[in-house]
Image (cartoon, rainbow, N blue to C red):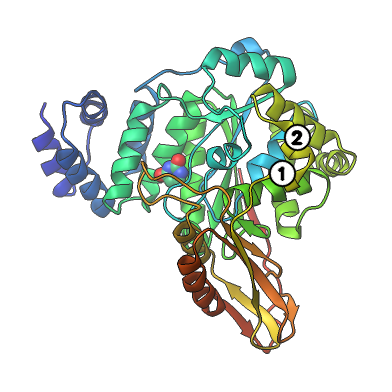
C-alpha cells in the first residue's frame, strides 16, 4: 500500500477501505507520510467527502493511535462532555464542578483555543498555579478522591487527531462534518468514558453555521458513539452571539466563578442545566431531567458547586485566594467602555467577529505556538434582545495595547447592531438529539 494511491483514490471520489484509512493514520502519526501528502489527502476528503463507514474507520484509527484510557478503576459510570467550540464558552468550568458536587464523576480532558474559539485549558491556566498537565495516574487519583479532575489532553490520547487537527487548521479544512465527527469522537473514545454528552454549537461563532449542518454532525457522532458502545446525546446550542457576558481567559474565569455562586446569565444557565441534567441521567443519578435541573440550580445557589470548584483548583495546584477574591486577578492596562450611539434593541453581536477581535487583542492564538494574554478580552453589558438608550455602555474592552484598543473600539461599534424593533432573545438550547 502507498500513500500516493490513497490520495489518488480520494481525489477521484472513490471510497477508501478500512486498511487504507488505517495505513494513512498510522504512517502519518509515525512521521512516515509527509505533511504535504497528508494535506493533499485531507483536502481531497474535505472536497469529496467520506461516507459513514469511512468516517467510522477514521475515528477508530485515530482513537487507536495512542493510549485508550482505562477509567474502570474509578468504579463509576464516567460521562464525558465535549463542545464543538464557540466564543465565550465557559460551560465546562461551571457545569463540571456542579455535577461533580451532585455525585457525577468528572474525568475531563480539555483543549486549548485555536482561531477565534476559546479553549477550557487556556482559561484554567489563567488561575495562577493551576496545573493542567498532571499525568494520567494523578488524574485518575483526583477523580477517585474528590470526584473531579480537569486537565489538558495528553500527548498519548489520540495523537493522530492532534496532528491531523493542526494540519486541518493550517490548510483551511476544519469545517467538514466527517473530519469534525471523527476528531471529536476519536478523543472521546480514547478518553475512556462510557457515555458522552456533546454540545453541538450552531451559529456565526460555531463551525456549524446552520441547524441542518449541526443535526447531520450530531447524528453522525451519535452513530459513531453507538458503534463504539458509548451512549451519546447531542444538545444543539446557540452560538450566534457569545455565550454569557465575557470573552477572554481571565474574564471568563471570573464569570464562571460568579456563576458558580449562583449569578448566571440566562443563556449560560439554560445550557448548563440542559447538559448537566443529561449528564446526570447518563451517569445513572436520576432519569428525571426536571429534577436534575432543580438539583443543579440548588447547588449553584447554595455554594456546593462553588466549593467543589475550590476543591478542584486547590487539588491541581491553583492558588485559591484568587478564586476567593477575584480582584487579585491581573487586569489589563486599559479597560475602556463602549457607548451606544443610538437607542433601540440589540439586534446582533456576531460571535465570530467578537471571537476574532478577542483573538486580535491577544486572548487567542492564530498558530499553535502563539502565546496568549490572559487578561485581555471583551465584557458585554448587553445581550441580543436587550433595550438600550443612546449613551448606555454596551461593553468594556480590556486591552494591553492602546493601538489595539482603538482598532477594536471602532470595529466593535460596527459589530454590535441596534434595531428600532424588538428582535427578541435567542433560544439557547435549540434541540436535543439522542
Ligand atoms: N473540536 C474538535 O475537537 N475537533 C474538530 O475537528 C472541531 C472541533
As drawn, 127 above or below 402 = above
Q: Is residue 83 visible?
A: yes
Where is residue 56? Give x, y as percent.
37, 34
Left or right: 364 in relation to 163 = right
Is the residue under label 2 in contact with that under label 1 (CB below 8 Å)? Answer: yes
Residue 242 vertical placement versus 36 (above, below): below
Residue shown at 26% from the left, 29% from the top: 25
Residue 421 lies left or right of residue 258; in this view the side is left
Query: How many labels, in total?
Result: 2
**In front of the other: 429 or 149:** 149
| Residue tagged 1 | 328
Quarter of the image for residue 32 reads top left
Q: In the image, what residue occupies the spot 73% across and 20% down?
A: 146
Q: Label 1: few (<14), some or many (≥20) within 10 Å?
A: few
**Is residue 387 shown above or below 156?**
below
Q: Which residue is pictured at 22% across the width and 30% down the height?
A: 24
Specify which label sits upstream in the sequence, 1 or 2.
2
User: Does residue 220 appear anywhere in the picture?
Assistant: no
Say which mark, if any, is on residue 321.
Answer: 2
Measuring from the top left, give residue 70's x and y in whole percent: 53, 14
Q: Is mark 1 within 8 Å of ligand 1?
A: no
Is disc 2 placed on a helix, strand or loop? helix
| Viewer-proximal residue among 428 and 59 | 428
Amino acid at each position: 500500500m502507498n500513500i500516493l494511491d490513497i490520495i489518488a483514490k480520494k481525489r477521484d471520489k472513490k471510497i477508501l477501505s478500512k486498511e487504507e484509512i488505517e495505513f494513512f493514520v498510522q504512517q502519518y502519526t509515525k512521521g512516515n507520510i509527509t505533511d504535504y501528502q497528508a494535506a493533499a489527502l485531507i483536502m481531497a476528503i474535505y472536497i469529496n467527502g467520506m461516507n459513514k463507514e469511512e468516517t467510522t474507520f477514521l475515528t477508530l484509527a485515530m482513537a487507536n493511535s495512542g493510549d485508550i484510557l482505562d477509567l474502570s478503576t474509578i468504579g463509576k459510570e464516567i460521562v464525558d462532555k465535549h463542545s464543538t467550540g464557540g466564543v465565550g464558552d465557559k460551560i465546562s468550568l461551571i457545569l463540571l464542578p456542579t455535577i461533580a458536587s451532585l455525585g457525577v464523576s468528572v474525568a475531563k480532558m480539555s483543549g486549548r483555543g485555536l482561531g477565534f474559539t476559546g479553549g477550557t485549558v487556556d482559561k484554567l491556566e489563567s488561575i495562577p498555579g493551576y496545573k493542567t498537565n498532571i499525568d494520567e495516574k494523578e488524574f485518575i487519583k483526583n477523580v477517585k478522591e474528590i470526584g473531579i479532575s480537569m486537565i489538558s489532553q495528553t500527548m498519548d490520547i489520540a495523537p493522530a487527531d492532534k496532528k491531523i487537527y493542526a494540519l486541518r487548521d493550517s490548510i483551511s479544512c476544519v469545517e467538514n462534518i466527517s473530519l469534525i465527527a471523527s476528531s471529536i469522537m476519536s478523543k472521546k473514545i480514547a478518553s475512556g468514558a462510557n457515555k458522552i454528552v456533546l454540545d453541538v454549537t450552531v451559529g456565526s461563532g460555531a463551525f456549524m453555521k446552520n441547524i441542518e449542518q449541526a443535526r447531520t454532525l450530531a447524528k453522525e457522532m451519535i452513530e459513531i458513539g453507538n458503534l463504539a458502545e458509548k451512549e451519546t446525546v447531542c444538545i444543539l446550542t446557540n452560538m450566534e452571539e457569545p455565550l454569557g457576558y465575557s470573552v477572554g481567559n481571565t474574564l471568563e474565569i471570573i464569570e464562571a466563578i460568579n456563576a458558580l455562586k449562583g449569578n448566571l446569565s440566562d443563556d449560560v444557565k439554560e445550557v448548563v442545566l440542559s447538559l448537566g441534567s443529561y449528564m446526570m441521567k447518563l451517569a445513572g443519578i436520576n432519569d428525571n431531567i426536571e429534577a436534575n435541573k432543580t438539583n443543579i440550580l440548588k447547588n449553584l445557589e447554595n455554594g456546593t458547586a462553588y466549593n467543589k470548584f475550590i476543591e478542584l483548583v486547590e487539588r491541581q495546584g491553583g492558588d485559591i485566594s484568587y478564586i476567593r477574591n477575584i480582584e487579585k486577578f491581573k487586569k489589563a492596562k486599559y479597560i475602556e467602555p463602549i457607548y451606544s450611539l443610538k437607542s433601540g434593541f440589540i439586534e446582533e453581536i456576531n460571535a465570530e467577529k467578537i471571537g476574532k477581535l478577542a483573538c486580535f487583542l491577544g486572548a487567542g492564538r492564530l498558530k499553535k505556538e502563539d502565546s496568549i494574554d490572559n487578561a485581555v478580552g471583551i465584557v458585554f453589558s448587553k445581550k441580543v434582545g436587550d433595550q438600550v438608550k443612546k449613551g448606555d455602555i454596551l461593553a468594556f474592552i480590556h486591552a494591553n495595547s492602546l493601538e489595539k484598543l482603538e482598532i477594536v473600539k471602532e470595529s466593535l461599534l460596527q459589530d454590535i447592531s441596534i434595531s428600532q424593533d424588538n428582535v427578541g432573545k435567542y433560544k439557547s438550547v435549540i434541540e436535543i438529539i439522542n
